[in-house]
Image (tube, helix red, strand yellow):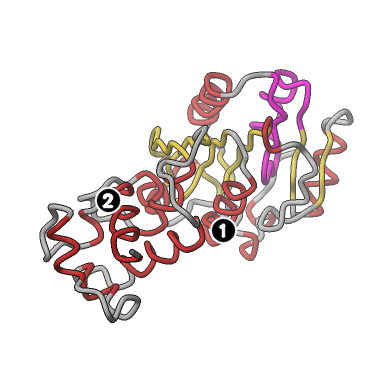
Amino acid sequence: MKAHHSFFKKSLGQNFLVDPHYGQRIVDVVFGRIEPSHFLLEIGPGDGKITEKVLHHFPKFACLELDKRFVVNLKNQFPELNVIYGDATQPPLHANPKNLAVIGNLPYNVSVRIINSLITMGVEKMVFMVQKEVAERLCAVPGQKAYNSESVFVQYHAKAELLFDIPPGAFQPKPKVVSSLVYLEKLKEPLVSVPSEKEFMRFAKACFSQKRKMVRNNVKNLYPDVNVEEKLEAMGLKITSRAEELTIPQLAELQSVLEN
């Protein structure tokens, strides 16, 4: 089924990959990184271009689609396909996350929400097309401008790699932004050991709350009775350190030092 221009729903953030070169590169990544023994879920299969290529490689395969028109078309096109009508921001997933891999072209406006909920669920492997800016945040390391509390959250749980960019011209309709393909793989153990993941993420958010400010100013309110400068110095860090200069282990150590 060829979708024509009036077919796209802006409200669902639909941009379909029409360039076969990039389609094939994505499929190669999926085959290279995800074993056929995984249960594979594709989010937002749309007109089924990628679906068609991966369908027979994965004995356990399903699609999650929010646009009823595509659900109908996919079922007609691939009668054997398990198509779930549903919203990826609230995945109706009964599959065992231990063996679950998820791929998809994520709508720009909800991509981070979807990724965070899948990471929290413990999904093993993910290959996603997202806005380049989002990809840079997921994969950023200390010292890079994109490094923020989202980078900390993702990399606490997973290895994150930006694989390649995909230009607007590869899509129909053309988005205003460059897209990137990212690969996320759950770590066997979280990157650092912290007493409470929830508290650590709250602390990381506070550290990055105002990027131009130094860490000591961002966390002052959390620890009014602690000399933050002294603790930074004891860790061998500059008292003028900004959150974007600190690694995840350093952030965890700083939290622990301030708590005790």
- Give the numbered dot on residue 250: 2
Disc 1 packing (10 Å; few <14; some 14–19; many ≥20): few
Q: As drawn, which residue projects farthest toward the front?
A: 260
Disc 2 packing (10 Å; few <14; some 14–19; many ≥20): some
Region rendered in magenta: 37-61
Specify the quadrant that holds the C terminus. Answer: bottom left
Residue 136 percent across, percent down from the top left: 35, 48
Task: Give the residue displayed 51% in from the left and 61% down from the top.
Answer: 198
Kindly state the secondary structure of the residue where label 1 is placed.
helix
Q: Nearer the viewer, mark 1 or mark 2?
A: 2
Q: Is residue 156 above or below residue 233?
A: above
In the image, taking residue 78 as reference, residue 125 lies left or right, namely left
Amino acid on which the number 2 mark rests in the picture: Gln
Specify the quadrant that holds the N terminus. Answer: top right
Task: Tell me which label, 1 or 2, sits earlier in the chain.
Answer: 1
- Give the numbered dot on residue 113: 1
Asked whether 89 falls inside the magenta stretch, the response is no
Q: Is residue 29 above or below residue 228?
A: above
Task: Give the residue displayed 12% in from the left and 65% down from the top.
Answer: 239
